[in-house]
Image (tube, rainbow, N blue to C red):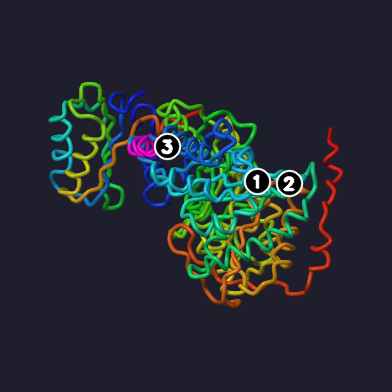
Amino acid sequence: MTVADGRAIITVLGQDRVGILAGITAVLAAANVNILDISQTILQEFFTMIMIVDLKGSNLNFFELQKQLKARGEELGVQVTMQQVEVFKFMHRI
Amino acid sequence: MPTLFSFTPEEILETIRMVQVENLDIRTITLGISLRDCATGSLKETCRRVYDKITSRAEKLVAAGEEVATAYGIPIVNKRIAVTPIAQVGEPSGESDLTPLARTLDRAAAAVGVNFIGGFSALVHKGFTKGDRAIFNSLPEALATTERVCASINVATTRAGMNMDAIAELGQLIKETAQLTADRGGIGCAKLVTFCNAPEDNPFMAGAFHGPGEPECVLNVGISGPGVVLAAVRQHPEADLGKLATIIKNTAFKVTRMGELVGREVSARLGVPFGIVDLSLAPTNALGDSVAEILEAIGLERCGAHGTTAALALLNDAVKKGGAMASSYVGGLSGAFIPVSEDNGMIRAVESGALSLAKLEAMTAVCSVGLDMFAIPGDTPADIIAAIIADEAAIGMMNNKTTAVRVIPVPGKRPGEMVEFGGLLGRAPVMEVNNFNPAAMIRRGGRIPAPLQALGN
């Protein structure tokens, strides 16, 4: 496995406001990253978004995309993480 | 809630919370490197080979660790190296002072960017060879004049008994090391561990070395997660102790799976075999990253109260049971570490008078490592330090487990005063020792015979 392909999970946490989804998906679209699934809830007043994305067609490597997402998150005042899907598989599935 | 492929949002958020709020991390990845083929008849040539081998083998260790940590979003706090006990590497040179080898290790560690390198070690449980003797000769100077080198001495095993000559001498050497680093609170002693039943694959410093039964090169992983266990215990104030054990097991399972994943990925990138996951709870001075606070969350007013040993036994066993299912190759020390200086809850317990040295010793009978990172008055006689080591080694020997002592007699300090080491090593309140004199026993020397368990075959 290399870090450049495969699936990743992106989580966005923070105060709810207009434009978070648009801001994050714009970064993904520009990088040619396909969104496979998305879930969005408000837990208490916190905006919580979880996305599963496919990095196969991405024109950025994993670390560069991670950096851009983080930067956009900072502009929007939310915390963005992107992790390889294996983390969740390994931790939660036997 | 909908599920995202096979994950629920709760599971995903649980992982994120563990890392971001509860300090889940891979505490350490340690590259074990055999230096046996570096031994030559000339110390200078041996040093050259040692430097070349370490720097070429560990060249990519730090970068690989950082890449994997970023990809998985799980921090790897320390990247370290463990080498063949230097007593064995230096012995063919015939030199009686191996300090130059310690300095070589220090330079090699700096060159590849690791903060500690373990293995300035000797295994003397049954007696000394010339190389072991040379390590003892060089210890204080080597520890005082290097930054990154860690030393360990195995003085006892369940099968061989206890080498009381070595223990008596270590009492002196620890005093000397403290004196040579008196301007820094005796910090040299924080890099020296005395073991009974030393594990060969322990990834945690200061006791890490690359044991004689290990392969050429191997990657071992030490996971931690006191913060995650603490959060889980606090969420269940209603659970009885049986249920609590299950909750801790589940948590330890998840944490260990992380270690297994990260360890396998880093070792694949380095092209070396994956060794073991050490499933320990190793505290840090970060808020909530405390083993003592877990014991308090189980229901004790302060760590050190009556009941602490029982609570620690529950915790230690549950961590092992959860971890043992998560990884096929579990090793190292595996269990709860209870260093005083690296755990805010332990520091508070000593300061408030709840935790004495005697209670700490009792706790080590049911936990991972032993009497770790505690400070005592600088004027404590060497014989008393040797006796502290002997008591702790006896607990390990009789109970067929690893125990260790990492004690710092802080020059010029009295009981109740604080010593600051800074950084990873934290700060420690100076603890009172029992000052009745054990010298006559220590000076008898010789070897305490192995207990009957030695004849287990």
For the magenta stretch, what is the residue range?
Answer: B60-70
Which mark sits nearer the N-terminus, 1 or 2? Answer: 1
- Circle on res. B128: 2
Residue at the location (69% across, 52% down)? B366
* Element on which disc 1 rests: strand
Q: Amino acid at mark 3?
A: Thr
Q: Amino acid at mark 1?
A: Ala
Of B457 and B292, nearer the camera is: B457
Q: Is residue B334 left or right of residue A9?
A: right
In which quadrant will I find the N terminus of chain B?
top left
Distance Cα–Cα, label 1 vs label 3: 23 Å
Distance Cα–Cα, label 3 vs label 2: 30 Å
Magenta region, main secondary structure: helix
Q: In the rendered view, would you say B180 is above or below B65? A: below
Q: Is residue B187 left or right of residue B70?
A: right
| Residue highlighted by disc 1 | B122
Q: In the rendered view, would you say B454 is above or below B373? A: above
Q: Residues within 10 Å of mark 1 (few under 14, many from 20)?
A: many
* Element on which disc 3 rests: helix
Mark 1 touching mark 2, by CB under 8 A? yes
On what subunit does the disc labeled 3 rest? B
Q: In the image, are marks 3 and 2 on the same chain?
A: yes
Q: Amino acid at mark 2?
A: Phe
**Where is residue B423 shown, x and y percent of the image?**
43, 60
On what subunit does the disc labeled 2 rest? B
Q: In the image, are marks 1 and 3 on the same chain?
A: yes
Q: Is residue B301 left or right of residue A57?
A: right
